[in-house]
Amino acid sequence: MDGRLKKSAPSINMAVFMDGNYMNMEKTTVSKFAELFGGEAALYKAPGRVNLIGEHTDYNGGFVLPGAIDKAIYLAIRPNGKSVCNVYSLKNDEMESFSPSEETLPRRQWARYLYGVCREMLKRGGRVEGFDAVVAGDVPLGAGLSSSAALCSATAFALNDIFENGFSLFDLALIGQATEHNYIGVKCGIMDQFASLFGRRGNIMRLNCKTLEHRYFPFDPESAGYSLVLLDTRVKHELANSAYNHRRASCENAAAAIRRRHPEVEYLSDADMMWLEEVRSGIPEEDFRRAEYVIGEMQRVLTFCDALEAGDYKLAGEMMYRTHDGLSRLYEVSCAELDYLVEAARNAGVTGSRMMGGGFGGCTVNLVDASLREEFVREASKGFEERFGHAPKVYDVVISDGAGKVPTPQIN
């Protein structure tokens, strides 16, 4: 891989999250720390993320439009004056110990995220010494909300702060990305870490995956009478990984054909539909359809951003539907479960809906008039269960701030 974004990487069962089982994750996390290690700890958190539009544009050098959400990974942490790190997973009720200076990976995979962040900081000249920590969170597991990136970001932010390393947020995003590459084996891009660290309440960010430049756009649907709701199909079809590689190859083939006529084209994001039409007869029809979707998606992202600046959520929602149509018909990465939920949204008058992520399962993201939210969720869930044998999970999310230190709550 070239280090750019890859959202369809194999999911990693980190098994450290609480899935919303506790009302107050902050108090729960520090209480467990006090029970295990005694005394107080500093508390940090980093959120999961949604990507509102800009799907499969990452590895094509295009735009994505993520935002941090109000579900996060929490880390209670305190230096212990030793050379060993003791980390407890609240979800698994497991303790893992490791030394940042040794090259032996922790036995448990969830601990490798923390270990990897330590190692990547040391590689960059940072200081990391022994610490005790408890990790927990309410980012739903397996829903495509980037819980692994949130754990890397929370750990990186905490270590940067308590050991006074002075790394920038961008440095921390790169550390998180390198952790996934080198210690987990997932060649992800930087979007998820970027959103978790740079998130801003009431805003989403347009990230240029080629230059890594970003710009914030206002997104506060609640104040305009809308809700942002995720419906999780709770399925992941096996096609996902092979399909990702096949579609990426199609995009690269189409870009190469255009490049022969227009040498300035490095990625499909540099091309337009006219240039694609010029090479239509020289590439497989399947490659043409994939490229047609990607080039169209570039424009939909820009239109979506213009709509947000104008406060036009209806136009933004229409772009979401068009994205799903392209993903389903041209890019062919949807599935019956996702298509059903999007069609249910259309029939219910939902403002915007589309599949989110690599495809073949996962969530739909829905921009819903708040007055329709309850009925839409009820009817869509009922119909989905009748057809597929199980109900989708429902998550309401609010666009929130990125990683940071949290005031330590008082424990009774």
Image (cartoon, helix red, strand yellow):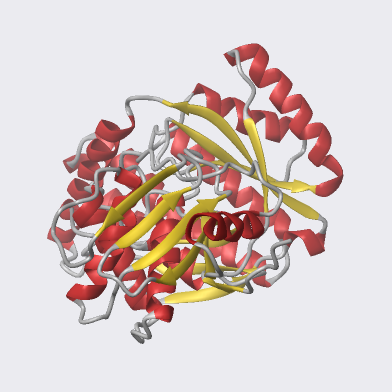
Q: Position of residue 25 (x, y in %)?
A: 63, 54
Tell me how many marks there are. Answer: 0
Image x and y of residue 182, in percent: 19, 56
- Horizontal relation, residue 162 to residue 250: left or right: right
**343 versus 365 height, above or below:** above
Q: Is residue 213 above or below residue 244?
A: below
Task: State which quadrant residue 246 falls in.
Answer: top left
Q: Quadrant of the C terminus?
A: bottom right
Question: Extreme front residue here?
Answer: 38
Q: Position of residue 207 (x, y in %)?
A: 43, 68
Residue at the image point whose x is 53% and y is 59% from the top: 33
Q: Residue furthest right?
A: 371
Position of residue 324 in the picture relative to residue 100 (left or right): right
Quarter location, residue 158: bottom left
Residue placed most toward the observer, 29 or 49: 29
**400 lies left or right of 76:** right
Residue at (56%, 70%) from the top-left corner? Answer: 40
**Residue 271 seen by the camera:** no
**Residue at figure coordinates x 35%, y 41% from the top left:** 12
Q: Nearer the viewer, residue 116 or 402?
A: 116
Image coordinates for residue 129, horizontal then vertical, percent: 29, 74
- Front in this rendered view, residue 74 or 326: 74
Determine the residue positioned at 43% across, 57% down. 151
Image position of 271 (left or right of 119):
right
- Regarding residue 400, the answer to whether it shows in the image is yes
